[in-house]
Image (spheres, rainbow, N blue to C red):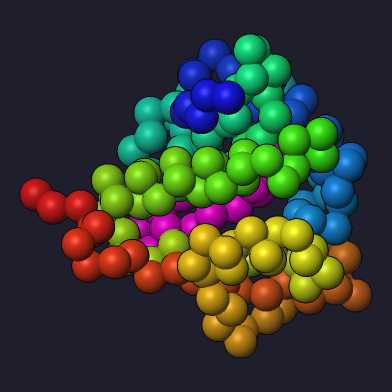
Amino acid sequence: MEIRSIRADEGLRVRNFRLRALGSDPDAFASTLQEEQAILESEWRSRAERVAKGETAATFVADHEGAWMGMVFVFREPRAPDVVDLAGLWVDPLVRGHGTGHHLLDAVMAWAREQKAHTIRLWVTETNTDARNLYKGYGFTETGRHQPLRSNPQLKSLEMTLEMPAGEIGGD
């Protein structure tokens, strides 16, 4: 399994994988399948072109012989340059429990180091026990902050963070 950044020409592939994730696990995401189906193909292409540069955002995929088995999106907010936000991590149910999520988090950690981030932040649905356990096992901690899940306000989304070890923050 290769963990790699998406290429600029993979916008429609990102779209198809994202829609598959939303269809499989709708309560794991803030957006809905219907919302993302409504996004124009040209926008998916444009996003991939921007994200493939890796300057302020990146998308990593777990590629097994051409088949995508996992994906994660990470971005930096201009208002908080020392914080990297992780979003949309999803692993195909066929390969869950075999380290794919951990390997995607390794890629996020490496990108955060390059960005000189001090903190990686994410929001996870309270009922998504497997994802919460993955993040906790990687060293993320729950901050106590929560908010309604935008796609299903009956559920809560919990904030988790990982502080980068001082020796791992990228230098000049």
Residue 13 position, x and y percent, is: 68, 20
Residue 153 position, x and y percent, is: 86, 72
Is residue 16 magenta-colored?
Answer: no
Q: Residue at x 33, y 65 (%)?
A: 164
Q: Residue at x 61, y 43 (%)?
A: 99
Start and end of the magenta stretch?
A: 75-91
Q: Residue at x 83, y 69 (%)?
A: 127
Q: Give above or below for 123 relative to 50.
A: below
Residue 169 position, x and y percent, is: 23, 58
Q: Nearer the viewer, residue 157 or 162?
A: 162
Q: Count numbered badges in the picture.
A: 0
**Is residue 125 something one can see in this rendering?**
yes
Q: Residue at x 52, y 36 (%)?
A: 59
Q: Nearer the viewer, residue 48 or 25?
A: 25
Q: Residue furthest front?
A: 98
**Apparent side of residue 160 relative to residue 107 in the rendered image (left or right):** right
